[in-house]
Image (cartoon, rainbow, N blue to C red):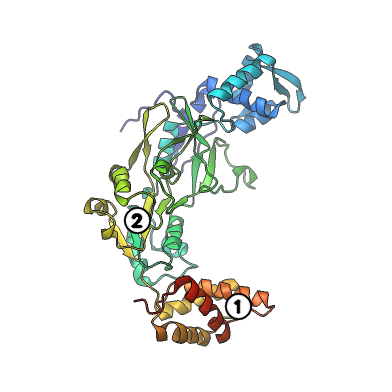
Amino acid sequence: MSITTPPSFSSSLLATIMADESFRPSEPATLHETGIPNNLVESLIIKRLAAVGATSGRQLANDLCIPFKALEELYQKLRSRQLIMHSGAAPLNDYNYALTEHGGERASLARQTCSYVGPAPVPLMDYVLSAEAQTIRAESPKRDQLRNAFRDISINESLFESLGPAINSGAGLFLYGKPGNGKTTLAQRITKCFGQEIWVPHAIFEDGQIIKFFDAAYHHQTQDDSDSLIHEAAYDKRWVKIRRPTVIVGGELTMDALEIWQDPISNVGEASLQMKSNCGCLLVDDFGRQRIEPQELLNRWIVPLENRVDFLTLASGKKIQVPFEQLIIFSTNLEPSDLVDEAFLRRIPYKIEIADPSPKEFHVLFQIYCEKFGCEYRPEIVDYLLNNHFLNCGRRLRRCHPRDLLSQIRSFCEYNELLVELRPEYFDRVVESYFTVVLNDVGSK
């Protein structure tokens, strides 16, 4: 199969993808290899100088995440056009630069057009190929990887056997069951079953528009290669190495969040939630309780779920095609069939019930959380809790109960300057406040 490279696509990036299974963006040697127009880089330079005043050419290059050697010629052109000037010498055969009066006027006009000041963007096609190269569907995690991802949480064997094939497929899944049984925790751990790190761009450029992509709320940066004791090959600093993302949205989800949002004042775009979750997991928590109807979400995602591509609209009105390469997880306390129709359920092939824990698993959970809370696990006291506050009064077990009850015991003990430990009277105290006020589910079936 031949690959046609668009004019804006950097050949070094394609070479990286074709040469190695693991994606790593190569450092561009020239401005042409960045794949973005020179006038965009010029605009970023003068806007940056307007923001910080005089600074060295190397520092400007660091701010734009473009190699200094690729910018030296452009600095000279901007000087010859009297947009910037030397304001003094800088170390390493460099100069400090500042805006001229004419350059200040141009910077003001540039900010009115687009106020983005930050790392230079990457072309949209570079991002598209990176997402396809790093897709979770190519990972196909096996049993050992799942056990490692779930190693410090309790999960019964039957649930583990159901989750394994669903995660391995990379297809969407429903996690349903009563609240408090760890559906959200499971979804977060599922991401760890796949390759741990991917590369994402700070920003994307297409059709004259800049779209911010890297989001610290969802993208957790790993250690910079420059800090490594073993020097690795240089990479394109416009990209960030992150842990595979888990984007969680709940009742606050709106249709606007699924589109590219354009700030009318700064004229800078913001990537949609599903774009930010690419190559990771997108958890729609509490599905069915969003501010949008489930049917609206069905209509919006039915094609992306089928074809693994999404279509978004830029502020200019241009439609762009982007990958839809994430594991979609719907977590709900309701029956999936009560929320959506058969067409949608067919595109989410795995429906897995997260049932209440057994008394045996309840003990295991207490063992885990006693270790985390730094107190001794006493099985006879957990039996006292089960017999007096659960089994004898028909209260259902939830996986969140050991953590929540131990948290209240710790707070009680710390407040009263007591040793944190499992005692019947401590449980009698915290159960009364926790269940009567918060859950009030005595006798629920």
| Position of residue 249 measured from the top left corner of the image (x, y, whole percent) | 44, 52
Q: Nearer the viewer, residue 374 or 184?
A: 184
Q: Furthest residue to the left?
A: 342
| Position of residue 397 measured from the top left corner of the image (x, y, whole percent) | 42, 76
Local crowd size for mark 1, using a 10 Å CA cut-off: few (<14), some (14–19), many (≥20): some
Q: Mark 1 highlights which residue?
A: 375
Look at 39% across and 50% down and name the residue there: 291
Is residue 374 visible in the rendered image? The answer is no
| Position of residue 252 measured from the top left corner of the image (x, y, whole percent) | 44, 51
Look at 39% across and 48% down and name the residue there: 326
| Position of residue 171 measured from the top left corner of the image (x, y, whole percent) | 32, 52
Look at 34% across and 71% down and name the residue there: 158
Q: Distance between the residues labelled 1 and 2?
A: 39 Å
The answer to which of marks 1 and 2 sits earlier in the sequence is 2
Amino acid type, mark 1? Cys
Q: Quadrant of residue 315?
A: top left
Is residue 313 visible in the rendered image? The answer is yes
Question: How many dots with numbers?
Answer: 2
Q: Nearer the viewer, residue 214 or 25?
A: 214
The N terminus appears in which quarter of the rendering? top left
Q: In this view, does 423 lie above or below 216?
A: below
Amino acid type, mark 2? Gly
Q: In this view, does 432 lie above or below 50?
A: below
User: Pointer 1 and pointer 2: residues touching (CB < 8 Å)?
Assistant: no
Of the numbered discs in the image, which one, if any, rests on residue 309?
Answer: none
The C terminus appears in which quarter of the rendering? bottom left
Of the numbered discs in the image, which one, if any, rests on residue 288?
Answer: 2
Residue 390 placement, left or right of 311: right
Residue 406 placement, left or right of 93: left
